Amino acid sequence: MKEIQHIVETINWQVITEEMNKKGYTIIPEFLSEHQCKEMVGQYDNPKGYRKTVVMQQYRFGLGEYKYFDYPLPELVQAIRENIYPKLAPIANLWMKVLKTGKVFPNTLRELQALCHSNHQLKPTPLILKYGVGGFNTLHQDLYGDLYFPLQTVLFLNEPDKDYTGGEFVITQQNPRAQSKAIVLQPKRGDMLIFTTNYRPVKGTKGYHKVNMKHGVSELHSGKRYTLGVIFHDAAS
């Protein structure tokens, strides 16, 4: 999808890199149009195109529902995955280098998928999430297997304080030998949030160390909230 490719190329990725290195997350405003957001929401109840539906309360994940897309992914989702990944791979590789993990991620999504498939991770992970009044998502990490890419994105498909209230995006940073820090975000419709899947590097007095991070969603007070999650590695199950 050339429209997504054009948008990605107009983003100042140097600024994005600096924000990711500093905070472990960043927001790109108005990445999707209002039409694209409404189109994604409108497709939610279509029985085709999904491989699995998860009712959160059945697994104590929270209160709400989400659906994993099946291959082939919708054109918009595939375009986001393909065009964003090469911009994030250098950030991920810098993190792996300063943390001395020995890991190196490939430059393209196709190469990452090949690694996933060789590791028996064959199932697509992009998903769309739906919350109603009282809905929430417990703190978690989207790993899905031994091989996982350390960055992911979520795109917000509704307008806060208009389509819903509450439902803030919550990130926790679990600092070593200290209390956890909570970060509360409320992006607008069409915004893309990029954040760490598992951990990020933080520079201390003795060099860089890992800081573990999780994410979730606070309780909705009114309305409905939909988000599109784009994860780059495939799942084992």
Image (spheres, helix red, strand yellow):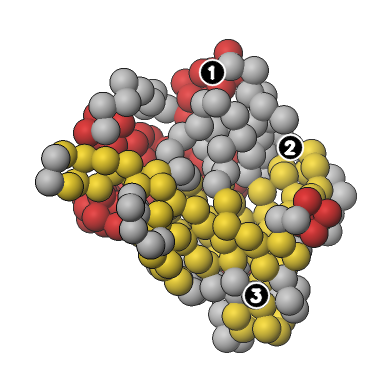
SS type, badge 2? loop
Question: Residue at 41% across / 68% down in the picture?
Answer: 183
The x, y position of residue 153, in whole percent, is 49, 51
* Amino acid type, mark 3: Glu
Question: Residue at 30% across / 31% down in the picture?
Answer: 96
The x, y position of residue 115, in whole percent, is 51, 18
Which image quarter is the C terminus in? top right
CB under 8 Å between discs 2 and 3? no
Question: Residue at 78% across / 51% down in the picture?
Answer: 59
Residue denoted by label 3: 219
Q: Classify residue 73 by image quadrant.
A: top right
SS type, badge 1? helix
Towards the viewer: 206 or 13: 206
Q: Is residue 70 above or below residue 40?
A: above
Looking at the image, is mark 2 or mark 3 nearer the viewer? 3
Q: Residue furthest left?
A: 205
Please state if 159 lies on the left or on the right of 8 as rendered. right
Residue denoted by label 2: 70
Q: Classify residue 130 by image quadrant.
A: bottom right
CB under 8 Å between discs 1 and 3? no
